[in-house]
Image: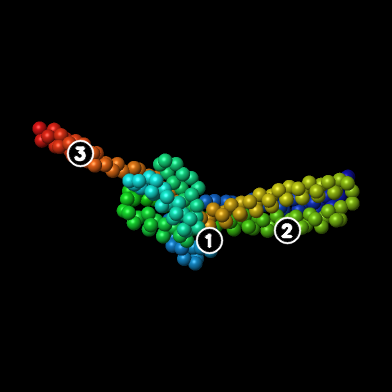
Amino acid sequence: MKKINPFLFLLSFIFFASCSVQQFSTEIIKPVDNNEDTLSNYFHYAVNVDYKITNKETFFADLKALAKQKDGYISELSDYMVVLDIPRTELESVLAHLAENEKIIALDYRTENHTENFNNYSLELQHATNTRNTYLKLLNEAVTVEEVLLVETELGRINQSIELLQTYIIDINQKTQYATVTVRIENLYRPGPIGHIFVGLYKSVKWLFVRS
């Protein structure tokens, strides 16, 4: 019977112990207030606003100034849509500003709760870091070339996992610090002096046809 190498047996045990599986999810919940309990969790708010405007240039300039004032930024801009990323603590004041002109025709919220994901990734990161420390100790105890190569291979795998988990955590931190407001715009036609004459003629002719 082939003798079992205690070092390789220990290495295999640590490998299988490190292969735990965590469940990750994104829970959709209703909007919540910016209280202390909420801010300690990891929520991302996305708001879609359908908005009617009369002057696109003025409206765009107002949104850019608003984003800058709230320490946010414009992440997307087109002829018919503006996307603002703002600190989530400023979301209510931004929506209140948009509602001042009473031209909002539709508004809907979407709230994503990333708290469970963040906690799971953090636990996985702690576990992976502890496992790496164990492998570093084993590397010092390795005697043969085979043992050294095995440990270094596992260290490479663990380091990649740690980098990936750190990226996930950073992404959640960044995403949940900001709320996204997507403003979809619809132009309102405002006729000039001559245009008012044609609008009046059109309404008169339309009234005659309705009467007949």
Of circles 1 and 3, the one toward us is 3
Residue 130: assigned label: 2
96 sits left or right of 122 in the view: left
Q: Is residue 31 visible?
A: no
Name which of mark 2 and mark 1 comes first in the sequence.
1
The front one of 11 and 162 is 162
Q: CA distance from mark 3 to mark 2?
A: 79 Å
Local SS, label 2: helix
Q: Position of residue 66 (x, y in %)?
A: 44, 55
Q: Position of residue 212 (x, y in %)?
A: 10, 32
The front one of 154 and 166 is 166
Q: CA distance from mark 2 to mark 1?
A: 25 Å
Residue 76: assigned label: none
- The amino acid pointed to by label 3 is Ile
For residue 40, above or below residue 27: below
Image quadrant in which you'd find residue 193: top left
Name which of mark 1 and mark 3 comes first in the sequence.
1
Judging by the rendered image, the residue that carries numbered circle 3 is: 197
Q: CA distance from mark 1 to mark 3?
A: 58 Å
Q: Position of residue 100 (x, y in %)?
A: 34, 56
Residue 41: assigned label: 1
Question: How many residues crowd mark 3 within 10 Å: few (<14), some (14–19), many (20+)?
Answer: few
In percent of the image, x 85 and y 56: which residue is there? Answer: 140
- The amino acid pointed to by label 2 is Asn
Name which of mark 3 and mark 2 comes first in the sequence.
2
